Image (spheres, grey):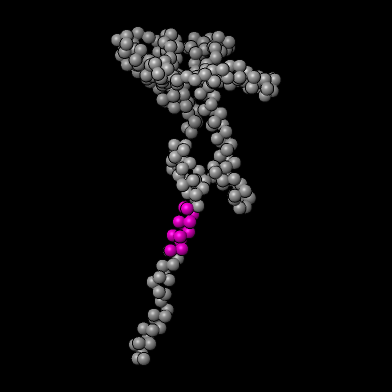
Amino acid sequence: MTRRGKAKSVVASREPPAAEAAQPAVRAATTDGQKETRRRRRRGDGSLEERIDYRFKDPALLDSALSHISSLKGSRNRAGSYQRLEFLGDHVLGLVISDMLFRAFPIDLGAAIRLGSSEANAGGRKRPAILADVCEALIGAVYLDGGFPAAEALVGRLWEERLRTTAQPLRDPKTVLQEWAQARGLPTPAYKEVARSGPHHDPEFRVAVHLAKFAPAEGLGRSKRAAEQAAAAAMMAREGVKPERANG
């Protein structure tokens, strides 16, 4: 073999074959694929998201929500289990249920609430936010005074019969108020943000609805849309406009 041939042989022996050089990338891709496969298997290959009709933008959140602490290695991985999300979800569920119950089955608390003259004159006895807070406070007071059985009995007396009765959902107040106004030849109600309070991550909006020939009405909500709906509901309640069911 010539010197040039030997040199080529030595260089060739030092350079890994193309397939061998590509192995790290292949292994990385395989590992990522395996992780994704495990992730999709844990998520039910998307079937769970289909059942709840929500597609997660961050799949890691769904993974955590479905992971028991026993499936994770090491005490430091506790944050990756569903425990932290369960704490948050419990409070969110309570908020949603409380709001649904209040809106579907209101109880007449307005006359019993003690208000300052300024708040009373501003229609505080009909404000959905105040009524909802007082309703929850009343249940809490019964719980502290008589324990869980007493609170459970109170909720049952107030809502169990209605909860067992099938009823169509109420139409949204903004739509009902607009149609009511149009039927009387009035312009479309206009909504204006009056104030915004609370921290940036959890604001509360106060919105006023204006309708020709009528005094404005205000509503509070955690979003502008919710506040507008509350304002429309407040005006309807003040003017004696009854809410309508979705089926008419």
Residue at 44% across / 39% down in the picture?
A: 50
Q: Is residue 44 shown in magenta?
A: no
Q: Position of residue 228 (x, y in %)?
A: 41, 21
Residue, x 58% and y 10% (percent of image)? 112
Instruction: Give the position of the C terminus as an image quadrant.
Output: top left
Q: Main secondary structure of the magenta part?
A: helix
Above or below residue 156? Residue 10 is: below
Residue found 64% across the figure and 19% down from its top: 153
In this image, 245 relative to 65: left or right?
left
Residue 134, quarter of picture: top right
Q: Position of residue 44 (x, y in %)?
A: 49, 45
* Res. 55 in view: yes
The N terminus sits in image quarter? bottom left
Q: Nearer the viewer, residue 149 or 168?
A: 168
**Quadrant in the picture for residue 237:** top left
Vertical order, 248 against 23 (above or below): above
Q: Residue 54 at what x, y percent from top left?
A: 44, 38
Question: Is 47 placed left or right of 145 in the picture?
Answer: left
Whether residue 33 appears in magenta in the rendering, the answer is: yes
Q: Which residues are magenta?
A: 26-37
> Which of 175 and 112 lies nearest the eye of the viewer?
175
